[in-house]
Structures are given as C-alpha cells and as structure tokens.
Image: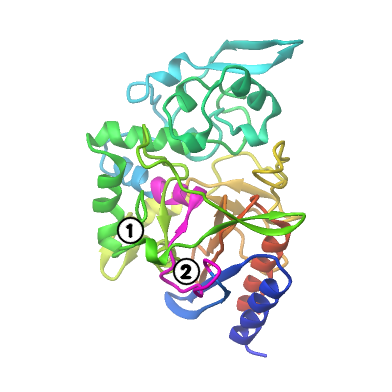
C-alpha cells in the first residue's frame, strides 16, 4: 500500500471511530507536495480542504518566533540581553513558590528574563492548565484566562519558577508578541503580515477569520461523543496573542514549514539567515518529558513523543533522539490547543501538518494518528 493510500485509510478510520469530526493532512518532501487529503467534515456538512480555516492556537508560537529572530538579525534586540527595557513589567513579576495554607508564597524574581528564555520556555512563565498553584492563584485573584486576551492575564500572573533554572511550557510567546509591537512600533498583525505572511504568500493566516465560509467548527470530545462548540477568540482583544491568536489553513502552514525546511528561504524570498535558523533549531532548554495537565477540560497530559527525550529550540519542540517513526534528531515540531500538529525536518527532508478542531488538547487518539501519518511518510 502506498503512503498516500495508507494516510487516506488512517484519516477515514479516525473519523469512523469518532476520534474527530474531520481531519486534513498535508506533507512535503524536499519542498514538494507529496500528500494533501482529508476525511470527515469541517462543520458537519462541508469537507475539510487545504484552504479550510482553523484556529492555529499554539502553532502561532513558531511564526512569532521567526518574526522575533528576524529582529535579532537586524540588531533591534538581543537574544541574551535582559529584555526589561522593552518589557519592564517582567522586572516586577514575582515567583510563586507554592502555598502555606491559603497564603501564596511569593518572592521577587532574581534573574532578568531574556528573549532566549521566552522563546525556549525557560523564562518562568507558565500556563495555569499545567500548574495547580498558578490556577489557584489566578482564580483567587480573578485574573483573566489567556483566552480572554486581557493584559492582566500577563502582568498580574506570577512566574512559576526562577528564570533560567528549568523548563516548563508556558506563555512566554505572549510576551514575545508584546515585545515585537514595542520594538517595531506597530501592532503584531501588521508586522507579521509584512515580515512573514506577505513574503510567503500566506493569504489566509491572520489574527481574525478572513473568510467565515471556510471556517472549521471546534468540537469537544465528551463521554456522549463529539459536541460542537461556539468557540471564537475575542474580536476586540487588549493585545494580539503571540502565543495562540492566529487562524490559518493547512496550506498556509505547510508553506511556512517549507520555508523552515529550506533553510529560511522559499521561492527566492529569504526570511531568516541560514546560520540564524540553524542556531535557532538547536536545543536551548533542559530536556523534559511528559507534562501533566491539571485541567482535563483544556488538555490531556502532554506527551507527543512517548518514550523520547525532547527539549525546546527557539522555534518549537525538538526530539533529542531518533523516534520510532524514524524522525531524525533535532526535527522541530509542535501543536495547537485544538489538536493541530506539525513537524519539519531541519534538513528539509519532510514536513507535515495534521489539522482538526478538537478539544481537549493532546487527545491520545489524535497524537497516535499523527504518529501513524508520519510513519507512513517515512517508511
């Protein structure tokens, strides 16, 4: 059976088994499209297509990271200099060390945060769905959630560890997006449009829905099956979310990945210097494994490569050993909260996306589906 037929079968079976309402996959090899196909529906009626618009959620992070690294190349900001001149709010944040009964243990931060820390998830910034203490603190102090897109969700939320001392997936890219707006003097949407989307001709990727007629519906997986959710990010946010605010399509995102796999250049347009990209793809964090969720309605425990050591590059997660799917060491990969996933080999050998719109995140069946698709391509 060819890899295309295998992927067709995998996607169809996932829909038949109720894993999700619909899926779409695109894969490139050496920059050329080798698979594009889907199964199921995006909204209960219409099929998924390569131009179906979906919430990218945390797949936004890799795009914003590229925009930040462009500014490093241009000398507008340094990776390892304290970034408090741009983000003075970081200097006043406290570290939440836990609780004594009902009283939070807070202390001033001792280490100045850098751009490298924010990009590599070593800054101390956390997510409440991965930290019970942080969830408790936010609820007690009525701090808005990340999805409300209010500045208080950043500036009033403490760090969960001393910057530079460990690795924990968190909202550091929200701070990076804010830094980009302050460094460039323009809003994040305008900057990404001119710096990334226009050069790559990513016409459907934006902080907002460019065409509602192509929008996919988010579903929740419940004990009673799949339930459609009326989900949409706020239309008038206090800030544009560099950590999860973009909508986009499988076609656009694969274009972005093809640029990364080709050494920072696509169709004669260079977005990143090859040396900068190579350095960014290296490990910049401590090795970590499974991330335990404390909010099962938001996410399952996160372990996208079971049994494989992983760390963070400046662009996304990277595997520190070869995977059972034969993924080379150093492949960059990550995902979005509605169970979209991607990988891109650093040498451009392969790149792929799997799109759906399903919560909670890290659905074990979707993670397995993604692994099986990658296996089919690499076999």
Hey, which quadrant is residue 136 in on the image?
A: top right
User: Relative to 300, is 264 on the left or the right?
Assistant: left
Q: Position of residue 89 (x, y in %)?
A: 41, 19
Q: Secondary structure at mark 2?
A: loop
Magenta highlight range: 42-65
Point 50% across, 38% down: residue: 147
Residue 262 seen = no
Badge 2 vs badge 1, beta-carbon distance below 8 Å? no
Q: Is residue 169 magenta?
A: no
What residue is disc 1 on?
210
Mark before the other along the chain sequence, 2 or 1: 1
Tell me which colouring the rendered structure shows. Answer: rainbow
**Picture layout, residue 14 above or below residue 248:** below
**Picture layout, residue 229 above or below residue 356:** above
Circle 1 crowding by C-alpha within 10 Å: few under 14, some 14–19, many from 20:
some
Q: Position of residue 197 (x, y in %)?
A: 30, 57
Point 33% across, 21% down: residue: 85
Image quarter hosting the C terminus: bottom right
Q: CA distance from mark 2 to mark 1?
A: 30 Å
Point 25% across, 42% down: residue: 74
Of residues 247 and 277, the one nearer the viewer is 247
Q: Position of residue 139 (x, y in %)?
A: 62, 23
Residue 126 seen = yes
Q: Position of residue 238 (x, y in %)?
A: 36, 32
Of residues 83 and 14, the one nearer the viewer is 14
Circle 2 crowding by C-alpha within 10 Å: few under 14, some 14–19, many from 20:
some
What residue is disc 2 on?
348
Q: Secondary structure at mark 1?
A: loop
User: Relative to 109, is 176 on the left or the right?
Assistant: left
Point 44% across, 67% down: residue: 52
Image quarter hosting the N terminus: bottom right
Q: Is residue 58 magenta?
A: yes
């Amino acid at each position: 059976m060819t890899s295309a037929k295998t992927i067709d079968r995998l996607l169809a079976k996932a829909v038949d088994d109720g894993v999700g309402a619909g899926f779409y996959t695109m894969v490139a090899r050496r920059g050329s499209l080798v698979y594009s196909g889907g199964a199921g529906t995006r909204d209960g009626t219409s099929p998924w297509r390569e131009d179906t618009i979906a919430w990218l959620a945390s797949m936004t992070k890799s795009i914003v990271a590229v925009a930040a690294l462009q500014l490093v190349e241009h000398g507008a900001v340094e990776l390892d200099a304290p970034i408090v001149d741009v983000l003075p709010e970081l200097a006043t944040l406290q570290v939440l060390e836990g609780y004594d009964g009902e009283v939070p243990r807070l202390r001033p931060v001792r280490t100045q945060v850098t751009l490298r820390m924010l990009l590599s998830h070593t800054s101390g910034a956390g997510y409440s769905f991965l930290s019970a203490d942080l969830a408790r603190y936010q609820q007690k102090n009525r701090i808005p959630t990340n999805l409300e897109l209010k500045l208080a969700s950043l500036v009033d939320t403490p760090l969960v560890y001393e910057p530079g001392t460990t690795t924990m997936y968190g909202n550091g890219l929200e701070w990076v997006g804010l830094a980009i707006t302050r460094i460039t003097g323009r809003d994040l949407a305008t900057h990404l449009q001119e710096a990334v989307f226009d050069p790559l001709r990513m016409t459907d990727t934006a902080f907002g829905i460019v065409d509602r007629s192509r929008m996919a519906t988010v579903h929740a997986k419940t004990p009673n099956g799949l339930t459609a959710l009326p989900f949409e990010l706020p239309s008038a946010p206090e800030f544009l979310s560099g950590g999860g605010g973009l909508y986009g399509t499988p076609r656009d995102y694969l274009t972005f990945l093809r640029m990364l796999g080709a050494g920072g250049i696509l169709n004669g347009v260079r977005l990143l210097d090859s040396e900068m990209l190579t350095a960014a793809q290296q490990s910049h964090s401590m090795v970590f494994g499974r991330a335990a969720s404390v909010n099962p309605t938001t996410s399952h425990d996160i372990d996208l490569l079971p049994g494989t050591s992983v760390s963070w590059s400046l662009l996304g997660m990277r595997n520190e050993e070869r995977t059972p799917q034969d993924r080379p060491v150093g492949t960059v990969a990550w995902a979005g909260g509605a169970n979209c996933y991607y990988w891109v080999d650093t040498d451009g050998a392969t790149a792929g996306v799997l799109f759906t719109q399903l919560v909670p995140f890290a659905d074990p069946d979707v993670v397995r589906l993604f692994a099986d698709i990658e296996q089919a391509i690499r076999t």
